[in-house]
Image (spheres, grey):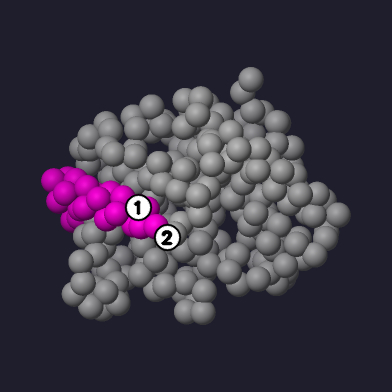
Amino acid sequence: MDLETIRLNAHSALTDALRSIAIQGVAERSGKAYDVAALMYHRLALCELLAELRSDRFQVLLCKSALVRLVAMRLTVAGRTFHPLTMCASKNFSFVDAITAGQLDLAVTLARLMPDRHDPQWEYEDDFLLHRFMHKRLLHLHAREEHDLHPLLARWEQVVGGEHAPYLEACQMLLKHDADGFHDALIAVIEERGRQFKEKGAYPEEARRTDGALFMNGFALLRLAELDGLATQREYPNIPRFARLPVSKLPLSPDAWKTPTEALPS
């Protein structure tokens, strides 16, 4: 499956999801329409970067992924009940999209709305702890909130039980402000991730061609390192330098996600 086919399929799925949201259909009522819309904006963003090297469109589409997710999360705060899979902290890739796009205020808003407990029925605890670390670290570095992350890391160590856990090591090095240790741990994450994507049948073709080619969590971890003043390389495998966007505030309306072409650079 080539990137153009993936892009066309994503546009079709996005159109269906936005229609369900507009008419409050079954998929909207379960929350799955918001999840699909966010995922399709995410996928379209990666297609734009990989196929066309359009970092400007990549940024706007990532931001729209985050805006969709923000609407869904605010609805749950207001009393709506959505399928729990759509609300898991570790499944919320839109936070990573926002931080990668350089939209730190938007990422902070999402982080504050995230559940503070993992859902054992729908997510692995170590995945939850990775994402909760990133949420709270950004809240500290950008919003100046105080968060003691040592208990979280201690729990993570218990969960992995001494097994090789490069994500944990990367987060430990971030907290220690150890640039060399972070670099080594990040490289280990990249290598392990590469092996996982090469496993036959481990990921759908669409994910393998998009998320397999761009390491979105890597962009987010590097952003956290930069915000804390750690020196990093400009480029890493699957983290190209032209996709490392500066911190900014895109002038998108909160409803820009409702129209795929709104504010999208030509």
Locate residue 33, reporting x and y percent.
71, 57
Q: Which residue is situated farthest in the top direction here?
A: 266
Q: Nearer the viewer, residue 32 or 69?
A: 32
Q: At 61% across and 50% down in the image, what residue appears?
A: 38
Q: Residues within 10 Å of mark 1 (few under 14, many from 20)?
A: few
Read off the magenta span. 173-200
Tell me if I can see residue 141 in this picture: no
Q: At 69% across and 63% down in the image, what residue appears?
A: 31
Mark 1 in CB contact with mark 2 (< 8 angstroms): yes
Q: Nearer the viewer, residue 217 or 141?
A: 217
Locate residue 236, reporting x and y percent.
27, 37
Q: Amino acid at mark 2?
A: Ala
User: In the picture, which quadrant includes the N terminus?
Assistant: top right
Quarter of image, res 241: top left
Q: Secondary structure at mark 2?
A: loop
Side of 216 relative to 180 (left or right):
right
Q: At 28% across and 45% down in the image, what residue appears?
A: 225
Side of 57 relative to 208 (left or right):
right
Residue 202 is marked as 2
Q: Amino acid at mark 1?
A: Lys
**Separation of disc 1 and disc 2 at Cα?**
8 Å
Image height check: is 261 above or below 114? above
Locate residue 57, reporting x and y percent.
56, 29
Image height check: is 30 above or below 9? below
User: In the picture, which quadrant includes the C terminus?
Assistant: top right
Residue 198 is marked as 1
